[in-house]
Image (tube, rainbow, N blue to C red):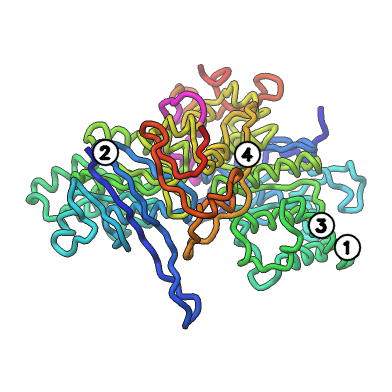
């Protein structure tokens, strides 16, 4: 059963280059469809500017989609407004990349964790206190009383990110979008945060969209991975399947570019040339075409659709590697 | 023993702050061999970038060099013999300037933002050459820049472009070309690929490796990512809280890490290859360098810490040939 399902979800941003010219659009997310099962950690991987963060923000309705539908528990939430949107937000939360910027510097730890409860009007005073206490315990800020009065600047990066997670967990959401939650942290702290998220996921059977550029981290965290390129999903599969036998040339190039912590290992690089083409009014051709090492004529004529090539393995390529 | 390009002995550099001295580099010893890449790995604030800044003598005003020697083989730049070592810390400002760029050049972290937006990229590199080598004519330096562009994998025609017409990766390539433009004896790469996407990072790393091999460049490569260090460096130093805790050739460090911090660092990284292992991470947080822990600086986070580790600073010693470790327990406590 899919907790979240999106169908042909799009987000275009208008750009006006010349005053009288036709309006152009950046196709940040372009007809993306995917489903996330209950209790699943779903990875969304791609390079900067591919639209992965925008997709995450659309899913928690921090942005309004240009088109398409977002089904949450079977109900379309893409057009919700006012009170209904507020109610929906009880069920979803987001963890942001930079814990130095996502916390209000004038709020204490206690205040930061309490704020979502106040906004959502969850529980009475006593219950709120209980929830704050247990949320801080869950994320390892113990004893919670010792942290209550502290301000973000008195916490280290790792502690701040734990606080952001506590803040997201305190309303007991069903679905969380974690946008690069570890990329701003020091290496030795990262593993702790990733393990914390895995623990919470197990205990609370959380459903999570894990947005990252780091394939190795995605492999560690996720059950399933989707690879995004220029606003389009190019491949979706179970994690080990995707890492072990990637089919899209972009996925293969991406995987081959990840450095390996072994000085004796010789990596086989898959060379791709050129740069990401512009996301402004893209042409009706495969978006990866200018960089693809194995393109043919048909790739120029139409965009490939996302097709199920093997059980559970979806690829958008005219000639996926078999 | 191969030729030493650089020999650093007991280097100490502190930053003065309101809260006291931050001991950014606190007694560091290492050699850099000619024609080799030496990698420095560690977390933010461990002092790895400060080492580069100290070597080039481009420290901010509140920095104080508290002692040590930095012997650099570059006597010819000061009118001496080419095999003569000079102590970079003892040079006058004028002499230090002669070492900069001709002797040691540096590619900074996020250096792609260092290009001047209102000058053409090629002209900026020509200017750097003109400043450091006044006798080179304009035509010669333009030719040199064109060659360098090819070396770093760019079309020489792009010299006529402005920085905003370049992508992040291309700007980084241009900055690398600039660092190579004065034919330095040694080059310091400080996280040259950190702000870039995986594919671009990989291309640039590959380019750097090729250039290093082709020109037999002596290089210091600084990164927080052990995988990157594994790929580019011959030898490596692991830094923690202003000190080197382990130093050896990269293969030994990766195959037989001895220091508990090195081991912890390796167990913190997820890998894309091989079996999926549970990551252990390292408990606690890196220490505050104003008031670092007594004894071994890693002891509050070390799983093997004993009484002695809290009291006495471990000696930095050679445990097997060319494998240096600073840990009380023989062979890293296991």
Residue A66 on the magenta segment:
no
Question: In which quarter of the view is residue A225 placed?
Answer: top left
Left or right relative to A267: residue B178: right
What residue does disc 3 label?
B98
Q: Which residues are magenta?
A: B273-302
On the image, the x and y values in percent for residue B44 come to 52, 45
At x 63% / y 49%, what residue is drawn? A273
Mark in the foreground, 4 or 1: 1
Q: Secondary structure at mark 3?
A: helix
Are discs 4 and 1 located on one and the same chain? yes
Residue B280 on the magenta segment:
yes
What residue does disc 1 label?
B140
Q: Residues within 10 Å of mark 1 (few under 14, many from 20)?
A: few
- Most distant residue in the bottom direction: A20
Left or right relative to A302: residue B258: right
Q: CA distance from mark 3 to mark 2?
A: 63 Å
């Amino acid at each position: 059963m899919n907790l979240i399902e999106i169908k042909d979800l799009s987000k275009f941003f208008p750009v006006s280059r010349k005053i009288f010219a036709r309006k152009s659009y950046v196709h940040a997310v372009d007809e993306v469809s995917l489903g996330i099962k209950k209790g699943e950690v779903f990875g969304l991987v791609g390079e900067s500017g591919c639209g992965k963060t925008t997709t995450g923000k659309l899913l928690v309705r921090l942005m309004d989609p240009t088109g398409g539908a977002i089904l949450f528990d079977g109900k379309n939430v893409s057009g919700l407004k006012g009170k209904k949107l507020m109610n929906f937000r009880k069920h979803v939360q987001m963890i942001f990349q930079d814990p130095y910027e996502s916390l209000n510097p004038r709020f204490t730890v206690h205040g930061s964790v309490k704020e979502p409860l106040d906004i959502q009007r969850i529980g009475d005073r006593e219950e709120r206190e209980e929830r704050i206490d247990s949320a801080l315990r869950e994320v390892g800020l113990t004893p919670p009383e010792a942290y209550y009065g502290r301000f973000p600047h008195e916490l280290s990066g790792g502690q701040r990110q734990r606080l952001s997670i506590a803040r997201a967990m305190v309303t007991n959401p069903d679905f969380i979008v974690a946008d690069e939650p570890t990329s701003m942290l020091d290496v030795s702290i990262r593993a702790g945060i990733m393990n914390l998220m895995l623990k919470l996921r197990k205990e609370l059977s959380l459903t999570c969209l894990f947005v990252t550029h780091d394939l190795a981290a995605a492999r560690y965290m996720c059950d399933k991975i989707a690879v995004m390129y220029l606003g389009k999903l190019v491949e979706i599969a179970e994690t080990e399947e995707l890492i072990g036998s990637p089919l899209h040339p972009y996925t293969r190039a991406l995987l081959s570019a990840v450095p390996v912590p072994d000085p004796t290992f010789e990596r086989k690089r898959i060379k791709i040339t050129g740069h990401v083409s512009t996301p402004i009014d893209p042409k009706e051709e495969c978006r990866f075409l200018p960089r693809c090492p194995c393109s043919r004529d048909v790739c120029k004529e139409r965009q490939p659709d996302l097709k199920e090539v093997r059980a559970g393995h979806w690829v958008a390529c005219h000639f996926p590697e078999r | 023993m191969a030729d030493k390009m650089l020999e650093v002995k007991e280097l100490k550099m502190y930053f003065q702050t309101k809260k006291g001295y931050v001991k950014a580099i606190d007694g560091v010893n290492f050699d850099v061999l000619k024609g080799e890449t030496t990698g420095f790995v560690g977390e933010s604030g461990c002092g790895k970038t400060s080492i580069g800044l100290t070597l080039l003598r481009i420290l901010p005003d509140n920095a104080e060099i508290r002692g040590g020697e930095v012997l650099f083989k570059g006597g010819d730049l000061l009118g001496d013999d080419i095999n003569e070592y000079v102590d970079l810390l003892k040079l006058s400002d004028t002499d230090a300037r002669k070492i900069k760029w001709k002797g040691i050049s540096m590619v900074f972290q996020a250096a792609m933002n260092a290009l001047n937006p209102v000058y053409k990229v090629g002209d900026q590199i020509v200017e750097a050459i003109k400043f450091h080598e006044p006798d080179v004519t304009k035509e010669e330096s333009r030719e040199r820049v064109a060659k360098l562009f090819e070396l770093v994998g760019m079309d020489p025609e792009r010299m006529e472009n402005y920085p905003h017409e370049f992508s992040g990766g291309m700007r980084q390539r241009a900055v690398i070309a600039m660092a190579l433009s004065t034919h330095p004896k040694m080059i310091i790469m400080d996280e040259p690929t950190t702000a870039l996407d995986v594919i671009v990072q990989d291309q640039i790393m590959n380019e750097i490796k090729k250039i290093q091999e082709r020109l037999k460049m002596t290089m210091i490569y600084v990164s927080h990512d052990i995988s990157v260090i594994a790929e580019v460096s011959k030898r490596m130093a692991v830094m923690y809280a202003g000190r080197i805790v382990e130093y050896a050739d990269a293969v030994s460090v990766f195959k037989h890490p001895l220091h508990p911090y090195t081991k912890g660092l390796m167990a913190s990284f997820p890998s894309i290859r091989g079996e999926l292992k549970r990551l252990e991470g390292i408990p606690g947080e890196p220490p505050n360098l104003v008031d670092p822990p007594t004894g071994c600086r890693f002891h509050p986070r070390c799983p093997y810490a004993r009484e002695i580790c809290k009291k006495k600073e471990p000696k930095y010693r050679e445990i097997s040939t060319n494998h240096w470790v600073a840990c009380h327990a023989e062979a890293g406590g296991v």
